[in-house]
Image (tube, helix red, strand yellow):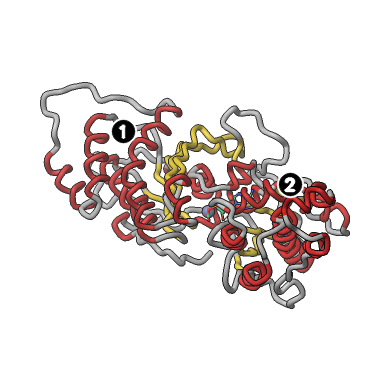
Amino acid sequence: MKILAIDTSCDDTSVAVVEKKNNQIRTISNIVSSQIKIHAPYGGVYPMLAKREHQRNLVPVCKKALQNAKLLNLKLKTKNEKPQVKIKKLRIILKRDELLLKNTEKFLLKHEKPKVGAIAITNGPGLEPCLWQGVNFAKALAFWWDLPIIPVNHIKAHLSANWLSPISGNHKSEILNTKRAQFPAVGLVASGGHTELIYMPKTGQYKLIGSTRDDAAGECFDKTARILGLPYPGGPAIAALAAKKESGIKNQELLNSKGITESEANGSWRIELPRPMLHSKDFDFSFSGLKTAVLYNFKGNNKTAWAKEIQQAIIDVLIHKTLKAAEKFNAKSIIAGGGVMANKELRKQFKNKIKSTKLRSTFHVPRYRLCLDNAAMVGACALLDKPKAIAWPASNASGQPAVDTAFLAGVANAGWQKIKVNGNLKI
Ligand code: KG4
Ligand code: ZN
């Protein structure tokens, strides 16, 4: 069964089509429209601007995802075109989203129902005004096409990205297979809004064992990057700077030309930032102290050394805490995800560190692009987890909905109208 998946949890508008086949979750299409350029001048995501962009982007992104999956078909023209009762109801569902309504109405009237069995949608955690855009759009599609909706937790979706095989169909062995036993597992989600450690006894079972008490790891990258005068998003900017060699600083001429004394330069070689809560007994994190230390001590010079130390401090904490959790829970695998996991140095050090310990865990991390927000991971999550909270269309005008009955067996009709957004949804 194919699933149409949608994610609008933050500043990316994404729609994907995924399918489960031979115990693998296949990405058929995965379109992401990034808003980075729009938010960069603000140094972070501006929620109301993001909401407006989702309204503008959802329909074109959805069309592209369906088109790439060869599921976009124009309606044949017939006389009796406008189903007035249906349109009236659609207008109620999207009554607060004027631009989205206009685009959606036009799209639905012009196109056939695509051959998908359900719609998966992120309903939290995330930025509420943004989440609502995706959820209302999903409700509109579910109503119009008579399809069930599967609400998905964004954190679980980040972990589920590890099960996605690429669009090309070639897959590397490390991509998780729905049959291969990898449990119990410990999950790490490090993104712009979250840093969480999760115990996973089986596929689809999650227990939160630790989370950040203040800033998330990605937020720490973003905020310290801003202090260093680097562009948004801070993670990739710090990573790029940290990858540079610092040899120039040793050159006396260069030091003189920059007006930096040798002792200042040497001092900056020894920048030592705190590793907050590294040795605390729990699995919680804290990154705000690291940010404050940068704020008070960065004097504007030797940015490369600062970037290296900021990145290393975050890496040290993430790896240490995750391995401690893996040891405690006898994890057969460590499953990571979230935007920060796109960091090359972090991925490299994770692999090396696991090799150098007695741990028997295998390490899994999605391909770079799939660490960042995307809708394919939302579809993967809906297919992996037993869909307890699945919501059927309330009215089933066309008789049986085109759903895979085996997939939906035993699932109650929750009524898609009841799906709510929760910006602080827990795992
Ligand atoms: O998962 P994501 O796309 O969105 C959220 O759900 O938050 O993560 C975005 C975060 C941002 O804070 C960004 O700075 C960080 O991921 N990020 C990185 C890298 N690429 C993105 N952090 C460190 N290194 C990177 N290469
Ligand atoms: Zn995310």
**Residue 95 seen in the figure:** yes
Residue under numbered circle 2: 243
Q: Residue at x 34, y 43 (%)?
A: 147
Lateral position of residue 104 relative to residue 10, left or right = left
> Which mark identifies residue 7?
none
Secondary structure of the residue carrying numbered label 1: loop
Lateral position of residue 230 relative to residue 139, left or right = right
Q: Residue at x 61, y 71 (%)?
A: 288
Closer-to-camera residue (241/171): 241
Up/down of 406 relative to 66, above or below? below
Reading the chain from its start, which is encountered first: label 1 or label 2?
1
Up/down of 88 relative to 31, above or below? below
Residue under numbered circle 1: 113
**Residue 409 seen in the figure:** no
Residue 405 placed where, x, y %? Answer: 42, 43
Which amino acid does the dot numbered 1 rest on? Lys
Give the quarter of the image for residue 145. Answer: top left
Lateral position of residue 420 relative to residue 370, left or right = left
Q: Judge depth for marks 1 and 2 and give the one in front.
A: 2
Closer-to-camera residue (100/311): 311
Calculate the distance from the C-alpha at mark 1 to the C-alpha at mark 2.
Answer: 48 Å
